Amino acid sequence: MKISTKGRYALAAAIHMARYYRCGEYITVSSIAENLGISKIYLEQVFSMLKQAGIIFSVKGAQGGYQLARAPVQITALDILACVELSLFKNTQETVAQRAPDIEKALRASAFDLLDQVVRGTLSEITLSDLATEVEKNESEHTIMFYI
């Protein structure tokens, strides 16, 4: 399974937003793009998809920007990837259905459908809150401590 750049950027931006969710402030695409080193134009395309899916919402104006539509604990990695990774969750195409339907059924039942279930199940258990917590753990490991 390969997650596209769009999917990785969507997850990274959503994690960034999750870390500031409690502040209640709106975050601009420009600030997220700058903080994460992502193209602003590309990120705007990603945000359009996230907004359409109801993951984020926007407010226009000087104090405007974007905010998560729900608490980070209520948004999963599956929610985010499902709206930007259009081909990731399509059913696997038939392989040998015409000439070997028994093999096709076996592949579906024992491999392809099972794999799809595991991927969906795993991604649905990972919340933005979990990912933001993991970021905080990693930050604390890299914090330099000065003693006097």
Image: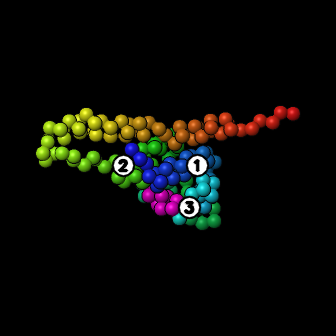
Mark 1 and mark 3 in contact (Cβ < 8 Å)?
Answer: no
Type of amino acid under label 3 = Ser
The kind of secondary structure element at disc 3 is loop
Q: Residue furthest right?
A: 148
| Range drawn in magenta | 42-51
Query: Which tag, 2 or 1, sits closer to the chain's start?
Result: 1
| Residue 49 or residue 139, whichever sits in front | 139
- Which residue shows up at 56% across the image and 62% down it? 40
Q: CA distance from mark 2 to mark 1?
A: 23 Å
Q: Which residue is mark 3?
A: 39
- Which residue shows up at 34% across the image and 47% down it? 89
Q: Residues within 10 Å of mark 2 (few under 14, many from 20)?
A: some
- Which residue shows up at 12% across the image and 45% down it? 99
In the rendered image, the vertical position of residue 148 relative to residue 77, given as above or below? above
Provide residue 70's location: percent of width, then percent of height: 50, 47
Type of amino acid under label 2 = Leu
Numbered disc in front, either 2 or 1 = 2
Provide residue 121's location: percent of width, then percent of height: 38, 36
Query: Which tag, 3 or 2, sits closer to the chain's start?
Result: 3
Q: Which residue is mark 1?
A: 16
| Residue 134 or residue 48, whichever sits in front | 134
Q: CA distance from mark 3 to mark 1?
A: 15 Å
The image quadrant where one finds the C terminus is top right
Query: Which tag, 3 or 1, sits closer to the chain's start?
Result: 1
Q: Is residue 128 left or right of residue 85?
A: right
The image quadrant where one finds the N terminus is top left
Numbered disc in front, either 3 or 1 = 3
Q: Which residue is mark 2?
A: 88
